[in-house]
Amino acid sequence: MQALPKASCAMKLSEAKVLIVDEVQESREALLQQLSPLVKACWGCTNSEEAMKICIEHCPHLVLMDISLSGIDGTELCMDIRENLKIPELAIAFITDRKENYSIIAGYEAGADDYIVKPVHPKLLQRRLSALLKRFNSYQTSQVIEFDDWAVDIHGHRVITKKGANDLVKKEFELLMLLCKEPGHIYSRDEILQQIWQDAASNSSRIVDAHIKKLRRIIGDRKIKTVRGVGYQIKAN
């Protein structure tokens, strides 16, 4: 296995272009007012059609959306952005008052990188968004981590198998990179939540399980081993 590259300069919040998707005018304008002074550019819209147009035209670095939208809801919009726009370095976060576990899990399974429950203190929101952007441009060299019959293309944020190349969304890529750092090492669910989602306390371990399940579909069930009662590991060559 080739060595991992060292991280380069991460994107700062002040350098980011942000899109806010919320059909409630009061909520949308409050976020615009809060974030506009902190970021490079900030747009607001009310529905999925407008959101897709802005994403295509302006290529934001971060999309903040409510999970409850008229017509196509937030989870469907998230999946549409991931599947149709294919922007590997686009971070997506839900910011919503929906705090049920099934809503949170649905958000992550749709491809979101974070799920923020309102109300949230402005300083905490700023830190959460900064953490999302922290990994941007982390792996700039074109390097491949090779295993027996599959590989990770770091620059392309994708996995290469005998069946072809598969693009990964941000959290899938970060989780796989964490496991690949030390093949054979067992990472607990809490450790994964802390390192990838930055908050083991407020996130369900089922989120980790859901992402592991997606990765196994791509690279094969036996490539990621479950160590019962402990966690997960990538099998070394």
Image: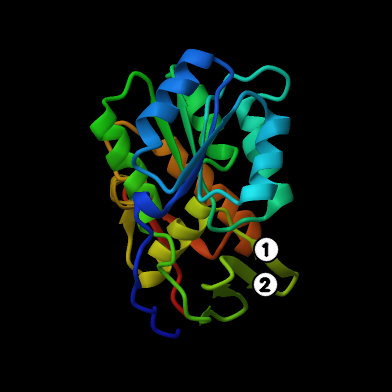
Relative to 20, residue 191 above or below: below
Q: Secondary structure at mark 1?
A: strand
* Real-space Cα separation, disc 1 to disc 2, in angstroms: 8 Å
| Amino acid type at image mark 2 | Thr
Relative to 7, residue 66 above or below: above
Front position in the image: 101 or 233:
101
- Residue 2 locus on image (x, y percent): 44, 85
Label number found at residue 161: 2
Front position in the image: 224 or 9:
9
Q: Earlier in the sequence, mark 1 or mark 2?
A: 2
Front position in the image: 227 or 138:
138
Front position in the image: 166 or 125:
125
Residue for point 67% across, 72% down: 161
| Residue 58 appears in the picture as rendered | yes
Residue for point 53% across, 25% down: 66
Label number found at residue 214: none
Q: Secondary structure at mark 2?
A: strand
Crowdedness near tag 1: few (<14), some (14–19) or many (≥20) residues, C-alpha within 10 Å:
some
- Residue 187 locus on image (x, y percent): 33, 57
Number of marks: 2
Residue for point 60% across, 51% down: 59
Left or right, 110 with respect to 12, comes to: right
Left or right, 140 with respect to 106, comes to: left
Left or right, 115 with respect to 7, comes to: right
Crowdedness near tag 2: few (<14), some (14–19) or many (≥20) residues, C-alpha within 10 Å:
some
Quadrant that contains the N terminus:
bottom left
Q: Are marks 1 and 2 in contact (CB under 8 Å)?
A: yes
Q: Which residue is mark 1?
A: 166
| Amino acid type at image mark 1 | Asn
Q: Quadrant of residue 221?
A: bottom right
| Residue 98 appears in the picture as rendered | no
